[in-house]
């Protein structure tokens, strides 16, 4: 009984000392927002061809929290490093009938991911632990997607609505998770300027995320704003070379009884190279886009690098 009481008291004392001693803390629970920055790049707002398609996206992210504090589920951590590898699949359908004068597109994304989290210090109800490490492999949340795209000459526009259905591998007692543990909804718009004759392109997608409270931790992320962009040049009809980036900015602070460190806001920006390639398979035009980002301007969140590879596969025309 006495050792257990001593452990709990020591953990509480250590947690309090950390809160007052550390200079910063992290916005968005676990430093992980719903929106995956960098998921859009060149040609983002170009409407898809009518019919079925599937996008396969392997991605990798590695980020460090430095010496600052982070609330991950029920655990308070310091000196955290997290890596996540994800394989996402998004089947979708674009009907041949127009909607509001544009091309509608409906899809559902899901996948498998692995997350590894190492912290110099972790404090929870179970006590305090130095050099804490956890890893998990499991299914992601579900991400329904709906959009409408319009074309006028070289100009392409898109409006979208998406969200998070929290079905992925998540436990508040873990520091390593795949899902975020709460629902979210995100709406925004995109634009692509595509001059096929000159071989030049520019794209941008911006949106806002509204988060529901995490029922497991009583933690609620603030409203998030995000921008993904890319600019590229086509040296040939098949190849595309360019630069891509993103900006993420939390507009309102976190809230709820689980936000023990306060209503912190987070931000980050990133920049990196992009390469695209289009090729024919069985008479269908496939496309591959690979890009890498190095992050900077980070505050109250992880900072590191990310790599994406998008393979878009058309499966058949609408009604076939």
Image (tube, rainbow, N blue to C red):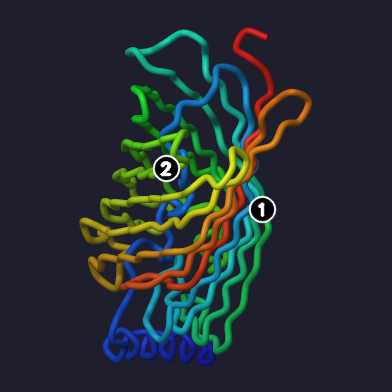
* In the foreground, 286 or 165: 286
> Could you tell me which residue is drawn at 43 percent across and 18 percent down?
103
- Residue 250 locus on image (x, y percent): 27, 58
Q: How many marks?
A: 2
Q: How packed is label 2: few (under 14 Cα within 10 Å), some, or many (20 or more)?
A: many
x, y (%) of residue 30? 43, 65
Residue 13 lies, in percent from the top left, at: 36, 90
The furthest residue to the right: 282
**Badge 2 element:** strand
Between label 2 and label 1, give the one nearer the viewer: 2
Q: Is residue 108 above or below residue 31?
A: above
Name the outermost residue toward the front. Answer: 198
Q: Left or right: where does residue 60 sit relative to residue 293?
A: right
Where is mark 1, residue-wise?
138
Q: Which residue is mark 2?
A: 201
Give the alpha-carbon distance from disc 2 to disc 1, as whole Å: 37 Å
Query: Is residue 258 toward the left or the right of residue 170 in the image?
Result: left
Location of residue 200 in the rendering, given as x and y in whole percent from the top left corner: 43, 43
Q: Quadrant of residue 238?
A: top right
Identify the residue at image location x=53%, y=77%: 81
- Tell me the element at label 1: strand
Q: Residues within 10 Å of mark 1 (few under 14, many from 20)?
A: some
Residue displayed at 41% across by 27% down = 147
Name the residue: 60% across, 61% down. 60
- Quadrant the C terminus occupies: top right
Compared to residue 146, the image places residue 300 above or below, namely: below
Q: Quadrant of residue 77?
A: bottom left
Residue 207, numbered circle: none
Residue 132 in sight: yes
């Amino acid at each position: 009984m006495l050792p257990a009481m001593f452990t709990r008291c020591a953990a509480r004392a250590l947690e309090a000392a950390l809160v007052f001693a550390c200079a910063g803390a992290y916005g968005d629970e676990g430093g992980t927002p719903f929106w995956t920055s960098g998921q859009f790049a060149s040609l983002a707002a170009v409407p898809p061809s009518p019919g079925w398609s599937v996008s396969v996206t392997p991605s990798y992210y590695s980020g460090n929290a430095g010496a600052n504090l982070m609330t991950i589920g029920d655990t308070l951590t310091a000196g955290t490093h997290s890596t996540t590898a994800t394989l996402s699949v998004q089947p979708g359908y674009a009907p041949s009938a127009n909607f509001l004068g544009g091309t509608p597109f409906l899809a559902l994304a899901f996948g498998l991911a692995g997350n590894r989290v190492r912290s110099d210090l972790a404090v929870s109800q179970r006590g305090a632990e130095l050099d804490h490490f956890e890893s998990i492999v499991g299914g992601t949340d579900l991400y329904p997607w709906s959009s409408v795209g319009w074309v006028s000459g070289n100009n392409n526009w898109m409006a979208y609505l998406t969200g998070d259905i929290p079905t992925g591998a998540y436990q508040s007692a873990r520091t390593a998770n795949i899902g975020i543990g709460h629902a979210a909804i995100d709406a925004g718009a995109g634009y692509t300027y595509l001059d096929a004759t000159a071989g030049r392109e520019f794209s941008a997608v911006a949106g806002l995320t509204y988060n529901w409270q995490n029922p497991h931790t009583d933690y609620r992320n603030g409203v998030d704003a995000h921008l993904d962009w890319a600019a590229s040049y086509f040296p040939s009809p098949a190849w595309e070379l360019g630069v891509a980036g993103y900006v993420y900015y939390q507009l309102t602070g976190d809230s709820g009884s689980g936000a023990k460190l306060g209503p912190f806001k987070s931000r980050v920006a990133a920049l990196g190279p992009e390469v695209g390639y289009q090729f024919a398979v069985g008479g269908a035009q496939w496309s591959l886009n690979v890009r890498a980002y190095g992050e900077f301007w980070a505050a109250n969140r992880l900072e590191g690098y990310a790599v994406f590879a998008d393979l878009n596969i058309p499966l058949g025309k609408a009604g076939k």
